[in-house]
Image (tube, rainbow, N blue to C red):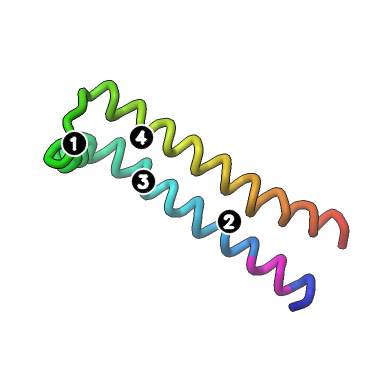
Amino acid sequence: MNIDQIQDFLLWCTLINFGVLLWWAAFFIFAHDLVYRLHTRFFVMSRERFDAIHYAGMAFYKLTVLVFNLVPLLALLIVT
């Protein structure tokens, strides 16, 4: 693989991962009650705990996408 292919790969990884994050956030915002009812069939939890878990999960996911996809992409773009 050359540098251009790695840059393209990291760009697509970043875009796809942010798309997944936006999909998750959209479901959380617009179908909150549906998602909550689905999860509480399997796990007993309050709405506040459910919201905190999803908010923390989205924050962790976003940080990992930034650290493992976007930062290496920007580093390669700066170097080349």
Q: Residues within 10 Å of mark 4 (few under 14, many from 20)?
A: some
Q: Give the Cα separation between the discs numbered 2 and 4.
A: 20 Å
Q: Give the Cα separation between the discs numbered 1 and 3.
A: 19 Å
The answer to whether the residue labelled 1 contacts the one labelled 3, judged by CB atoms less than 8 Å apart, is no
Instruction: Give the residue at mark 2.
Output: 14
Instruction: Give the residue at mark 1.
Output: 43
Q: Residues within 10 Å of mark 1 (few under 14, many from 20)?
A: few
Residue type, numbered disc 4? His
Of the numbered discs 1 and 3, the one sitting upstream in the chain is 3
Magenta stretch, main secondary structure class: helix
Q: Secondary structure at mark 4?
A: helix
| Residue 45 percent across, percent down from the top left | 20, 27
Q: Residues within 10 Å of mark 3 (few under 14, many from 20)?
A: some
Q: Give the Cα separation between the discs numbered 1 and 4.
A: 14 Å
Q: Which residues are magenta?
A: 5-9
The answer to whether the residue labelled 3 contacts the one labelled 2, judged by CB atoms less than 8 Å apart, is no
Q: Is residue 30 left or right of residue 14?
A: left
Of the numbered discs 3 and 4, the one sitting upstream in the chain is 3
Q: Secondary structure at mark 2?
A: helix
Residue type, numbered disc 2? Thr
| Residue 32 percent across, percent down from the top left | 23, 35
Q: Is residue 68 left or right of residue 61?
A: right
The answer to whether the residue labelled 3 contacts the one labelled 4, judged by CB atoms less than 8 Å apart, is yes
Residue type, numbered disc 3? Trp
Of the numbered discs 2 and 1, the one sitting upstream in the chain is 2
Numbered label attached to residue 54? 4
Q: Secondary structure at mark 3?
A: helix
